[in-house]
Amino acid sequence: MEDDLVQRIKANPEYHRLVARRSRYGWTLAVIMLVVYYGYILLIAFNRDFLATRMGAGVMTWGIPIGLFVILFTVVITGIYVRRANGEFDELTASIREKAL
């Protein structure tokens, strides 16, 4: 019974669309995150003087807000993925499940 269900799901074209969309979206967000993260790491490695430059007359340097941006960007990009996963991807999964049963 279970093997039959798996075969019906794998044969469903909507399942293949779901897998392709979810994979493409996940990889796109992962690449964006890697660019931001490694961009910051490369900035630390090759332009440390810029990050140590003070902002205005205060004591804060550019490294602090840029580092906070990387952390906040991680949270935001995760939220973007979760929102789409809970909406579009869950709807497609429910549709596939209904058709398979």
Image (cartoon, helix red, strand yellow):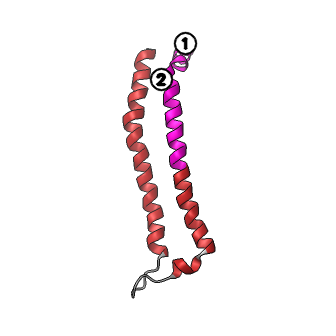
49 w.r.t. 91: above or below: below
Looking at the rendering, which quadrant does residue 57 occupy? bottom left
36 w.r.t. 1: above or below: below
As for residue 20 lying within the magenta part, the answer is yes
Q: Which residue is denoted by mark 2 in the rendering?
A: 14
First in sequence: mark 2 or mark 1? 1
Looking at the rendering, which quadrant does residue 23 occupy? top right
| Mark linked to residue 4 | 1
- Front position in the image: 56 or 91: 56
* Residue for point 56% across, 57% down: 35
* Relative image position of residue 79 (x, y in whole percent): 40, 49
Q: How far, Cα to Cα, is label 2 from label 1? A: 17 Å
Q: Amino acid at mark 2?
A: Glu
For label 1, count other residues whose C-alpha is less than 10 Å away and answer few (under 14), some (14-19) or many (20+). few
* Left or right of residue 35, residue 54 in this image: left
Give the residue furthest to the right.
Answer: 46
* Relative image position of residue 56 (x, y in whole percent): 40, 84
Per the picture, the main secondary structure of the magenta-coloured stretch is helix
As for residue 26 lying within the magenta part, the answer is yes
| Mark linked to residue 58 | none
Q: How many marks?
A: 2
* Relative image position of residue 78 (x, y in whole percent): 44, 50
Image quadrant containing the C terminus: top left
* Residue for point 50% across, 27% down: 17
* Residue for point 49% across, 36% down: 22
Extent of the magenta region = 1-30
Looking at the rendering, which quadrant does residue 69 occupy? bottom left
* Residue for point 55% across, 20% down: 10
